[in-house]
Amino acid sequence: PLQQRCSSLTSSHSATMSETMMRHLLGSDKKLVHDPGPKGESGEGDACLVMVFLVITAAIGILIYEKFFRPASEDKSEADMIEEQKAKAAEEGVENASDGMTDEEKRDAIRQAKWLTPSNDDPRIKAALTISVFFCIWVFLLSLSLMGTGFKLLGGKDSAKMFDVADNPISALLIGVLATVLVQSSSTTTSIIVSMVGADELSVNIAIFMIMGANIGTSVTNTIVAMGHFANADDLRRGFAAATVHDMFNMLNVLVMLPLNWIYPFLQKMTYEMAKDQEPCEGEKCNKTEFLKPYISPYSKGVASYDKKVAQYVSENWCAGQCGTGYSTDAMKLISAEVCTSSTDCSNVHSNYKDNWMSSGYLAKKRAPAYIVATASGPAEFHYSQPDACTSSTKFFDDETAFTSTVAGSLTAGTCYEVCGSKVKTGLCNKRLLKGGLVLEDWDMTDDGAGTFLTIVALIGLCSCLFCIVYMLQIIMKGAAARVLQKVVGFNGYLNIAIGCFITIMVQSSSITTSTLTPLAAVGIISLQDMFPLTLGANIGTTLTGIMSASVVTSKPVNAWQVALAHLFFNIFGTLIWYPIPKVRNVPLRASKFLGHMTAHPTYGVLFPPAYIFVCFFIIPGIAYGIASA
């Protein structure tokens, strides 16, 4: 018994020690509890920032080592290797393999040859660096999530209103671009659009054009990633071309599909036939399946938690008020008959009125007023709070369950009638967008201050992650590993589409897939021709998020499914147009090569990448949004 007690005490002490060590390692001196919500100190926010700054410190350390302490390299330069290749071919009397190539193509071929050269590095070092690469990818995902939160906070509540101003295909397209740039994920934008369509806040036709814009906006992330290769002109050229092949495909696809769908809405009609029998989800079926987000979200929310509900209230125009009672259709018809000018016009009810307040000739559910005041002539006055003149009121509905009314149709002028009463929620849009996390609870930052801090830290973190990944891959991927990777991605383009699709389905973000592959293309492991189909697969894979959002819509499921399926077929049709035929395939490839060459321009090459990003993804969509909302 004594031995068992000692053993029990020892195991308990060991568990306590290990738990204490883990708490300190994760940045918290309190008990480690996995708490994904905004409340509860579990150290996840601290751990997230520690990991980001750890990678930033590592990147700075590598730069210092490379600049001041690394021994002179004995590796031959690319120019020396080209000359050596020429001399060897002349000596052997055979044709030089690089004859007929441009200088850039020769440097790219030499760069690939370097990767295939066997490495003498210690396998243990490679194993440690491989683990470090996965750690950097994990921090990259955290930084991407933080940047999305930062952009949303900087955009403020006005960014949530942008969906309201789209009234034609062009404005819808550019607002889709801008919204996706702000949230850094087409998956997120698509989910929002699908939810708004399901809630009857957005028409299917306009939503489809927004989805096209989201496809363009999502490519900004890997284009930003490519800018991390400024230190090497050839790496920047290859990386920028690999990143912008995503842009070129999406833009060219929109150039074809937008006018066709504008002339005749074939996507809307086709998807309606496919989705017309869909039923609203109920009960447990309404839980959306997610793969990677549940693991990333607790850490990013531990730093800053964005209140989606406030943004939803703004975007769906609930700022005036929202009735907490779910009235029946017949009840809303009775209310509308008293307060609306006609069965097709309720614009008189409130200064905040928008078209989405009405549905099928009457006010939509939850748009019911708190009180109405009967007038001698014309519709009754509509109020979301009790008017000062209403010292007493009469119930509009006799039965709060069956919603029957004996006063409807015969209101007494000057009498105040209680409809939703105290169940109306007001001030919903006055709440802060920042609802939790370190930056609020510990540092008491403003929304703008937190947004600025997160954006700066995330951008530095992303660049640091990519720098460390590229640096370590140059050691890990030499020799056999590079040959295996090249054989896999170079085997067949259609297999690459499947690989890109599978990876994106797993991480639920095409931005993550393409941003991870861009550095590999920049350093010459993956060619532009192999990167293109991987990008196409990522575009198809990202549509799964919208489909999952449509599957949990509780109202108007047919409309939601239409938008989700339109996103899927937009990318499938685009792939069928731009990939199978070699001559057509060369159009986006040549366009992206041209953009890559522009980064090497002696005069403005350094300025071209940021100018391209700001003009295409911020300035043009921003101007369009400003004009549409004016």
Image: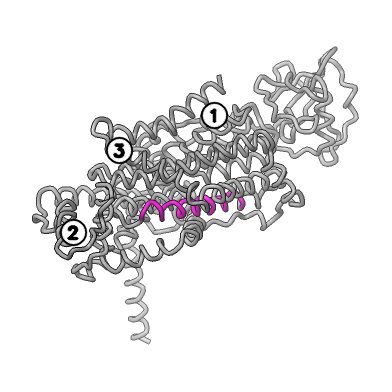
Q: Is residue 1 depicted above or below 488 in this figure?
A: below
Q: Name the residue under label 2.
A: 85
Mark 3 or mark 1: which comes first in sequence? 1
User: Residue drawn 25% across and 53% down?
Assistant: 99
Task: Give me the disc on residue 430.
Answer: 1
Q: Residues within 10 Å of mark 1 (few under 14, many from 20)?
A: few
Res 311 quadrant in image: top right
**Residue extent of the magenta highlight:** 527-547
* Mark found first going from the N terminus, 1 or 2: 2
Q: Which of marks 1 and 2 is in front?
A: 2
CA gap between label 2 and label 3 equals 28 Å
Left or right of 202? Residue 588 is: left
Mark 2 vs mark 3: in front: 2
Left or right, residue 607 beside residue 244 = left
Q: What residue type is labelled 1?
A: Asn
Residue, disc 3: 599
